[in-house]
Image: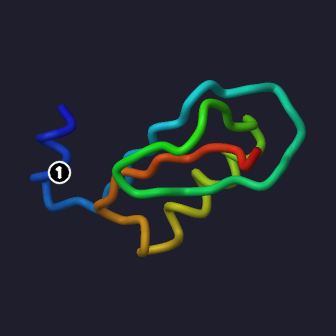
């Protein structure tokens, strides 16, 4: 399905979060085509999901997101 999305011509963002934790908001990092950590706060993930839809920098990219430890 991911291959179909990539070739669809639509604006897409693939977010690959690690473990989603019920922890307070913190700092997080985003990388392309890899993940740098093992956990992300559910609050930070929610904020990023909104941000990545608005920011064309993330369109047509696979984003890894993780809390900064």
Residue 30 placed where, x, y %? 55, 57
Q: In the rendered view, tell whether residue 13 sits above or below residue 42.
A: below
**Taking 50 as reference, is 2 left or right?**
left
Viewport quadrant of the N terminus: top left
How many marks can you see?
1
The image's colouring method is: rainbow
Q: In the rendered view, tell whether residue 49 sits above or below residue 51.
A: above
- Residue furthest to the right in view is 24
- Residue furthest to the bottom in view is 56
**Taking 22 as reference, is 67 left or right?**
left
User: Would you name the residue on which mark 1 appears?
Assistant: 6
Of 21 and 52, nearer the camera is 21
Residue 11 sits in quarter = bottom left
Q: Residues within 10 Å of mark 1 (few under 14, many from 20)?
A: some
Which residue is drawn at the image coordinates 39% and 57% (left, top)?
32
Which residue is drawn at the image coordinates 34% and 51% (left, top)?
33
Secondary element at image label 1? helix
**Taking 1 as reference, is 46 left or right?**
right
Residue 40 placed where, x, y %? 68, 37
Viewport quadrant of the C terminus: top right
Residue 25 placed where, x, y %? 85, 46
Residue 57 placed where, x, y %? 43, 74
**Taking 69 as reference, is 59 left or right?**
left
Of 19 and 60, nearer the camera is 19
Which residue is drawn at the image coordinates 42% and 65% (left, top)?
58
């Amino acid at each position: 399905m991911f291959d179909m999305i990539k070739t669809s011509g639509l604006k897409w963002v693939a977010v690959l979060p690690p473990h989603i934790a019920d922890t307070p908001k913190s700092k997080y990092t985003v990388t392309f085509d890899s993940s740098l950590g093992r956990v992300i706060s559910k609050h930070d993930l929610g904020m990023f999901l909104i941000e990545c839809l608005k920011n064309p920098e993330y369109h047509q990219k696979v984003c890894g997101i993780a809390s900064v430890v």
